[in-house]
Amino acid sequence: MHSIARNIRQLSVVHGRQLSTTRTLARDAIKNGLVVGMFASHKLFNSEQIPQAVQDKILQEAQAQGNKADAGSVQLVLSPDLTQHIAVVGLGNESTNMSEIVRTAVANGVKQLKAKKISNINIAPMPCAHASGEAAALASYSFTAFKTQKAEEQLPTISSTDAEEWNTGRVYAEAQNFARELMATPANFMTPTIFARRVQDELAFLPNTKVNVYDEQWARDQRMGGLIAVSQGSDEPLRFVEIVYQGHPGPVSLALVGKGITFDTGGYSLKLGKNMDLMKGDMGGGATVVAAMRAIAQLRLPINVVATVPLCENMVSGRATKVSDVYTSRAGLTVEVMNTDAEGRIVLADALHYTVEAHQPQSIVDVATLTGAMVVALGELYTGVFTPSPSLWQHIDRAGTATDEPVWRMPLHDHWDAMLKSSIADLSNIGCKGEAGACTAAAFLRQFVDGPRLTPPAIMREQNNDESIPRWAHLDIAGPMEASTSEGYHHQGMSGRPTRLLIELAKQLSAE
């Protein structure tokens, strides 16, 4: 009798294991996923589009596991019919501005479903459809181009019933992913020539878009002494990319100028070996500008935008520019090179002067991984913005708020102009006191936008109320160029920021 009971217990254990194994295999075979949002009140967003049986299962699981639906949290639930993994993402308390919460929560949900090898993911309507679309693309990004043994990873197909705004958000995010890819690619596979070719491949066939790529002879004909001075230390030939997008009749409303140093050793002012690998991303300004232009054209924004990117390497060789060398810029100003690692402003100066003269934009914004001083000041979160124009600053600030790309206005002052004096040339490429490095870099760039400021006024003042055309802003992205973690929608490594801000800026200006 006891042996019969023991055999029954053993058989039950075996059958239990078989049942558990069967259920596990069934779960592993599930290829469909759903992302739904839940507030801290356990209210599902837009619940009318979710079947009642699924709602009941989600709420039962939430209560059973003590899910408080904190912002960004994820709880995985198996659908009642065992055909779908459901990522219940926490939205926290309801509020009027939920874009960053939605972006983070949806990204976390997508990442967890990807880990389950889900091939089809549907994202239920969210409080901010645009941010949901951004999250879908940003969370799907990975950079494995140079892995010889790649993990078996198939990117899921992601869709949503949130139509137009969701798709627009996805265009914004795919542009950022493009910038991420350009910045992350090793410099031997992203030379100035290759970068220019990628731009042509990606943008040349977009509506209302023209891509011009110029060589060293063109730069010499254009008197771009700064670009030539920086590039001459490298065996890789320079390139100058110009993108013209015409979305409506009329003048150029916005010009974007991006720093395009595809690798920066510092030249004879040689950088330390630590973290020099990040200098493959020193063309982050150029990458974000190009990526933004792609999205602007794809969205067919009703605005005329021009982008220019001076491309070269900053290397050491017998031909390289030396500390104390003097060159003549396109603007005709002579510049003494007191630090060859301050090369970004040198190439940008020629590009700014050319862009203003050739296209006469209403506003011009340069974007550059320019100074270590900005990293010290603001870290990787904020982009530092220098502009004398209150109205342009307001547009940039609003674009940053709309895309959750934080920006901080930095000071421009007559004092910084005075610090750029040289004893033998019109300007020095760095400040003479070794302080306010980000500020003097911005002051240097302004000399090439609306005319030289070589003679300081008797009374020096802050430059914060100048609306003369072109309105100018300088975005120092040396901090945001890299993401230190892969939390939420971020991906550790080259960030591709602030691409989405630039797209939003163009969108806002198109409405003026």
Image (spheres, rainbow, N blue to C red):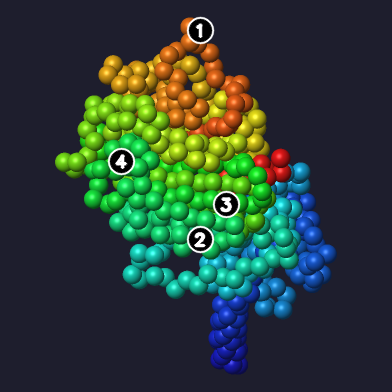
Query: Residue 464's spot in the image, x, y percent?
Result: 58, 21
**Mark 1 or 3, closer to the camera:** 3
**On the image, numbered disc 3 is attached to which residue?**
245
Query: Residue 256's spot in the image, x, y percent?
Result: 52, 42
Q: Please name the residue shown 71% across and 44% down the image.
A: 511
Q: How crowded is mark 3: few (under 14 residues within 10 Å), some or many (20 or more)?
A: many
Q: Which residue lies furthest to the front in this view?
A: 221
Q: Do the residues labelled 2 and 1 touch (CB within 8 Å)?
A: no
- Residue type at mark 3: give it: Tyr
Counting residues from the start of the chain, the first of labels 3 and 2 encountered is 2
Q: In this view, does 460 lie to the left or right of 93?
A: left
Counting residues from the start of the chain, the first of labels 1 and 3 encountered is 3
Q: Please name the residue shown 66% across and 74% down the image.
A: 84
**Residue at disc 1, secondary structure:** loop
Counting residues from the start of the chain, the first of labels 2 and 1 encountered is 2
**Residue at disc 2, secondary structure:** loop
